[in-house]
Image (tube, grey):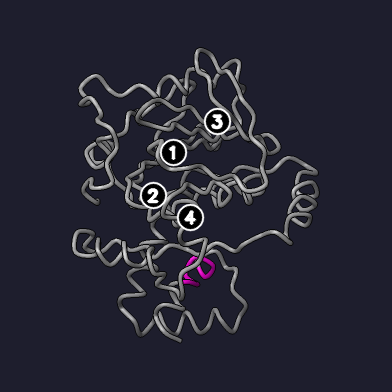
């Protein structure tokens, strides 16, 4: 089994989703391949960081509803490819990463690979969301090459975006970790928050990246003084607000009349000392 095949299975190996025979093959390869082992360890660290925010229990009866939805949609589903995700020398690997998306390091080019380079596929997040929000968020992070960074580093690397990731959000949500993402040629940022075991996440990306939601239907919404759109699944909602430089996305179970307006205002306003963002450019330096 070669490295390309192993890398394609690392996410499922981490989640315990591989059948026993494949799991043994991956474990054997990791024991003898330093490069793949380093990639797996980097993915595991991201998973542990997200998992530190605590678990959220799905409401009773929700599994049956989601299972019925997934069964009805399965005939139209296209399995997503996991991104080639490393924490190595990002500058030296930039050209290789770009080529991997263009030509597909896991095989021949596909429509899915091309779409990943030009859009933000929230279906990766939404499919698993009601059952395990943190696992769903982790899959989204892995797909878009997440790298844990400090808030200051995120602002420097994604200087074209207008956002904030304060240590504390209104309502008592404490920052757990900030991540630098890569959406094709453009940088993005994600942040995980926790309030006594309640999970909340934010994602920021340039408006040039088209958002995809699979079979999930969005609808317009007005939250406080903010106009945008939302996708609801059970108790969870993914809310999107867009200004000229940034799409601000918040994943939460918060009430949109009481708590959510203050959260959106907090993350959509950059800190006072932040530079004025310029229009996004694909030539922006890779992290």
Upstream in sequence: badge 4 or badge 3:
4
Q: Secondary structure at mark 2?
A: strand
- Residue 12 among those drawn in magenta: yes
Asked whether the beta carbons under mark 2 and mark 3 sit within 8 Å of each other, the answer is no
User: Disc 4 and disc 2: Cα gap in Å?
Assistant: 10 Å
The residue at 38%/63% (across/down) is 101
Q: Which residue is mark 3?
A: 239
Q: Which residue is mark 2?
A: 183
Upstream in sequence: badge 4 or badge 2:
4
Q: Secondary structure at mark 4?
A: helix
The image quarter in which residue 17 lies = bottom right
Q: Nearer the viewer, mark 2 or mark 3?
A: 2
Asked whether the beta carbons under mark 3 and mark 1 sit within 8 Å of each other, the answer is no
Local crowd size for mark 4, using a 10 Å CA cut-off: few (<14), some (14–19), many (≥20): some
Asked whether the beta carbons under mark 4 and mark 3 sit within 8 Å of each other, the answer is no
Magenta extent: 8-13
Local crowd size for mark 3, using a 10 Å CA cut-off: few (<14), some (14–19), many (≥20): many
Report if residue 47 is visible in the image.
no
- Residue 186 among those drawn in magenta: no
Q: Which residue is mark 1?
A: 203
């Amino acid at each position: 089994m070669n490295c390309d095949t192993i890398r394609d299975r690392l996410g499922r190996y981490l989640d315990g989703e591989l059948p026993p025979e494949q799991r043994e093959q991956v474990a054997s390869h990791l024991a003898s391949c330093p490069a793949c082992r380093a990639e797996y360890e980097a993915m595991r660290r991201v998973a542990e960081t997200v998992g530190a925010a605590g678990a959220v229990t799905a409401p009773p009866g929700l599994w049956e509803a989601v299972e019925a939805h997934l069964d009805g949609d399965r005939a139209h589903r296209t399995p997503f490819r996991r991104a080639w995700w490393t924490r190595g020398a990002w500058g030296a690997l930039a050209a290789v990463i770009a080529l991997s998306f263009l030509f597909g390091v896991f095989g021949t080019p596909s429509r899915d690979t091309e779409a990943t380079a030009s859009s933000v596929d929230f279906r990766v997040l939404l499919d698993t969301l009601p059952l395990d929000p943190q696992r769903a968020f982790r899959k989204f992070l892995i797909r878009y090459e997440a790298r844990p960074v400090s808030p200051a580093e995120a602002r420097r690397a994604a200087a074209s975006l207008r956002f904030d990731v304060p240590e504390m959000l209104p309502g008592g949500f404490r920052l757990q970790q900030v991540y630098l993402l890569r959406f094709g040629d453009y940088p993005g940022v994600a942040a995980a928050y926790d309030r006594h075991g309640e999970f909340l996440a934010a994602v920021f990306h340039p408006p040039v990246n088209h958002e995809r939601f699979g079979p999930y239907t969005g609808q317009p919404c007005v939250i406080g003084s903010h106009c945008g759109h939302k996708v609801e699944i059970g108790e969870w909602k993914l809310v999107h607000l867009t200004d000229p430089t940034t799409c601000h996305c918040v994943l939460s179970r918060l009430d949109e009349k009481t708590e959510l307006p203050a959260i959106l205002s907090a993350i959509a306003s950059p800190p006072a000392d932040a530079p004025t963002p310029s229009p996004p450019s694909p030539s922006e330096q890779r992290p």
